[in-house]
Image (tube, grey):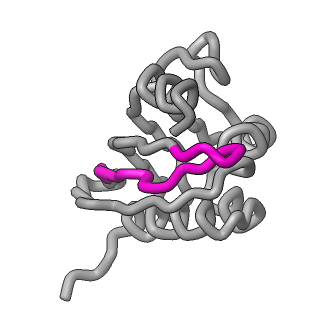
Amino acid sequence: MTTDTPAIAAHKKSIAFAMARDKESWLALFDPDAIVRDPVGKSPHDPEGQGFHGLERISAFWDMMIAPLDMIAIPHKRIPTGPNVVAVIMTAANKVNGIKAYVEMVAVYTVNDAGKLISLNVYWDVDDVAAQMAAGG
């Protein structure tokens, strides 16, 4: 049996806390200087594509992007690489205002020596999700 790396442990907790809508526990996973890019690049909630730096901005990210969701995230594969874990995830039921969207993602979680997340970079297709929402799910 393989023991989880600190990055895998952080990844598992991140998903569990997000699905449980436990903001306080989710935020506690992050280093104070962490960055969240979800998705990586420009998006309607991050027009400059700079990400969300520091706990105050990561908290705002939660309020905008996680709190409104009824989310079920299913990781299909985890690939540990030193202080990182690459996780291929499909968010199977991402429900907003009664509309479901299905999102395929690849996420890279990086932790420091203390096991705190210093970066979370998630890759997903913003246009695909927008089209699903426009079509009514």
Residue appearing at x 66%, y 45% in the figure = 96
Residue at the bottom extreme? Answer: 1
Where is residue 27 drawn, in percent x and y? Answer: 70, 57
Q: State the image coordinates of residue 80 (x, y, percent, origin top left).
A: 25, 58
Q: Is most of the magenta stretch helix, strand or loop? A: strand
Q: Residue furthest left?
A: 1
Asked if the stretch drawn in magenta spans residue 97, the answer is yes
In the image, what residue occupies the spot 42% across and 26% down? 128
Judge whether 61 appears above or below 87 on screen.
above
| Residue at image point 80% right, 40% down | 56
The answer to which quarter of the image holds residue 3 is bottom left
Residue 49 appears in view:
yes
Q: Nearer the viewer, residue 58 or 112?
A: 58
Span colored in magenta? 86-100
Residue 32 visible to an observer of this rendering: no
Left or right relative to 25: residue 71: left
The front one of 11 and 32 is: 11
Magenta span includes 88? yes
x and y, in percent, of residue 127 in the image: 45, 20
Q: In the displayed structure, would residue 79 be above or below residue 128?
A: below
- Work out whether residue 135 or residue 23 is closer to the camera in this orientation and state it: 135
| Residue beneath the point at 77% across and 44% down | 63
